[in-house]
Amino acid sequence: MRLKRRLTNRILPWPLVAAGVVFAIFTVSVTMTLAVSIQYNYQHITRTLRVLSSIDQLQSSLGEENSALRVFAWNRDAAFLQDLRAAHQVFLDAAQALMQAVHDDSPLSTAAQRAIAAGTGWHEQFAAEAANNGTLPKGYNPLAIEESFSQFRQLCQEVRTGAEARVREEEAVWWRRVWWTFAGFATSISLLGAGLALSVAREIRARHRTEQVLRQTYRNLEHAQRVAGIGSWTWDILSNRHTWSDETLRIYGLSEKEFTGTDDALFRLVHPDDQGHIRDLVRSLQQHGRGEGEFRIVRPDGAERILWWRAEVASDSAGLPTCVVGTVQDITDRKRTEDLLVKSEKLATVGELAVSIAHEIRNPLTTLKGFLQLLPNTPAEAHGQYVSIMLDELSRIEVILNELLLLARPQKAEYAPVDVAGVIRRAIALLEPQAIHQGVRVMTHLTPATPPVWGLAHRMEQALVNVFKNGIEAMPDGGRLAIRLWTSGGHVWVSCTDEGVGMPKERVSKLGEPVYSTKEKGTGLGLVVTYKIVEMHRGRIHVDSTPGHGTTVTICFPASPPPDGQPVPPSQ
């Protein structure tokens, strides 16, 4: 209810609503009253005009009859009797029409009856004998005829005067009603204007406050984007125009005047080697409605930067795409820090493994040294057996050194299909000396024909080495390390289960945080690098640990170029 009231006040302010309601009610009532009044006045005026017409015809017909009677009395010509009779018939018709016109008006009706009675009496007294028998009445007196006719005309004039007065009265009523109507309209329009003025003033104040809030919000947004280093942008699909925020312009190294808002203005800044990649991102955006990825740009000053780009398509109420809204972030410094972190962790891991590898290499070296010392004092026929043993030991040393060099050797960051089973085997071979030294038995169950994962083999190997190494170190008194590989739901899953001391939930929740380590002499960088590598491959890590019962680390990788969604690790 409160929301409805707020919306009503926002769309139609109450002064305007009140004025509109008053204006509507007044307009309807006045219109109906005026219509009734017009109809009433029209009927009265029309009836009164009929009275005037009938009284004129009544007086005219009797005058014609009087003239015809006087002419007949002068020359006794029977032809004038027909005019007398016709005039009298017109008199009768006019008398009937007059009575019909005044039947609702008592004053006019009384005067009309008197006039009709006077005219009828004049006919019966002076003209009926001539009209019926063709002879004049006895005692025919022209003066008496004129006197009687004058009385008739005076009565007719009374009727006319009353009718004309009634017409003037109706006209006066009409103009008074028209005046009051226009006065009412003027009042209602004034009220409507006042309400409109109040509502406009209120809207102006509200808009001013809204504009102030919007300006402050825009300044805060600009400040927040500048602090976070994240710029926003929009792409109007209909006009094919790009709009960039100030932070986006700063990231690209442009000013507002230098950016034209076209596709060419954007693609000119993209690194030549990443032109195809950015077009792939745009195609992914068109197909899936959203997209993200990183690419390089070359600023106008020649500086090369790495950007992270994320966008989503916005649609109208009909579901048709209208624009694309996105963000862009300069991740050059972060990428450099991550690369240094990965390299540092790799070197730290190699240094820690070197101790175990040196211990493992010392055993075959001792064997080689012993056999070399025995060779001068043994018969020649026994040399072949000694040489075979020595070659086996040298081969073992070579395998260990090759795995160590594979981990430490820098490789190009080019994504390609990776055989996860092969990566697991290389990681296990690299950690085998440490496992043997601590009495840990590594058990593997690798599902055959596992689909490849799109990624970097050496980075995945480093992540798995960190996970497997943590599992081995969690069992200082020895135990079993179970490593599984399987495929499910379009993803490749790797799990590592140890029989170590385990961890409580509060420690599990902090895994992957920088400088947090579960080991006394740990740097806390191993799991940070591991989580980052898995994230680079659109994967996810799930750790399940119980104190006293060991820990299970599950990693999943997409089996194809990454989809939009992220899988949830299944229960083991």
Image (cartoon, rainbow, N blue to C red):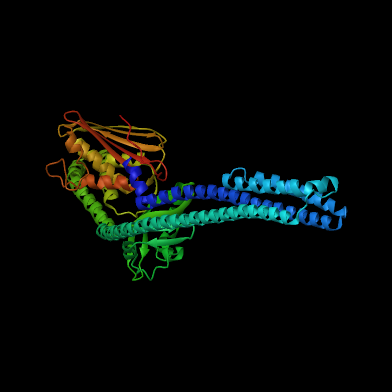
Q: Number of callouts in the render?
A: 0
Q: Which residue lies furthest to the front in this view?
A: 139
Residue 62 point in image, percent of width and height: 73, 52
- Asked where in the image residue 220 lies, by quadrant, the reply is bottom left
**Position of 123 compared to 346: left or right?**
right
Quadrant in the picture for the C terminus: top left
- Asked where in the image residue 545 lies, by quadrant, the reply is top left
Q: Is residue 513 visible from the viewing direction of this image?
A: yes
Quadrant in the picture for the N terminus: top left
Q: Which residue is drawn at 15% across and 45% down?
A: 522
Query: 440 or 490: nearer the eye?
Result: 490
**Position of 32 compared to 121: left or right?**
left
Query: 431 or 513: nearer the eye?
Result: 513
Residue 310 point in image, percent of width and height: 37, 53
Q: Which residue is drawn at 56% across and 47% down?
A: 40
* 226 over 403 or under it: above or below: below
Residue 457 point in image, percent of width and height: 34, 47
Residue 42 point in image, percent of width and height: 59, 51
Query: 6 or 142: nearer the eye?
Result: 142
